[in-house]
Amino acid sequence: MHTNKSTLAISTALKESKPIYISIGCNLDAIPHPNISQEPIPISLSPKLSNKMGLEVAVEAAGEFLNKAMKPVMVGGRKLCVAQASEAFFVLVDASGYAFAAMPSGKGLVYEHHPHFIGIY
């Protein structure tokens, strides 16, 4: 299978959860090109692997650090959407009982009616 630059760009965007830009001139859309297929191109992504032991150590260290804090506050921003982590963020908020704020870019991604919400950071 021949991989063209657009397919590579789309695969990279999906892997990295980042935007891409593909530009096609308005006067080129009807010109046939040998690398462009009329058939859908299947995109295969490898699953992301996690280091389970490293994750457990990191979570334990973060928990110890936060448990020593006087008034820990969690801050949610636009990366919650990019990482599809909004639900996980609120599971952590509820489990920890910590207050949380939102970055201006995260407004609308957090529940402002939540009892632990303290405002925009």
Image (cartoon, rainbow, N blue to C red):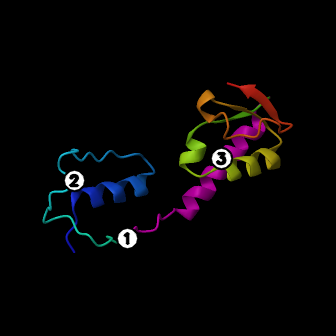
Check whether the beta carbons of the residues at disc 2 and disc 3 lie within 8 A of each other.
no
Q: Residue at x 63, y 50 (%)?
A: 85
Query: The C terminus appears in which quarter of the rendering?
Result: top right
Q: Which residues are magenta?
A: 43-70
Q: Earlier in the sequence, mark 1 or mark 2?
A: 2
| Closer to the eye: label 1 or 2 | 2
Mark 2 is on which residue type?
Asp
Horizontal relation, residue 110 to residue 98: left or right: left
Q: Position of residue 17 (x, y in %)?
A: 45, 51
Q: Earlier in the sequence, mark 2 or mark 3?
A: 2
Disc 1: CA contacts within 10 A as few (<14), some (14-19) or many (>=20):
few
Is 56 magenta? The answer is: yes
Q: Residue at x 40, y 67 (%)?
A: 45
Q: Which secondary structure, mark 2?
A: loop
Q: Residue at x 61, y 54 (%)?
A: 57
Q: Earlier in the sequence, mark 3 or mark 1?
A: 1
Label at residue 29: 2
Horizontal relation, residue 78 to residue 3: left or right: right
| Closer to the eye: label 2 or 3 | 2
Q: Which secondary structure, mark 3?
A: helix
Q: CA distance from mark 3 to mark 1?
A: 35 Å
Q: CA distance from mark 1 to mark 2?
A: 26 Å
Q: Main secondary structure of the magenta part?
A: helix
Is 111 magenta? The answer is: no
Q: Is residue 32 above or below residue 97?
A: below
Query: In which image quadrant can residue 115 be found?
Result: top right
Report the residue marked by disc 3: 61
Report the residue marked by disc 1: 44
| Closer to the eye: label 3 or 1 | 1
Mark 3 is on which residue type?
Ala
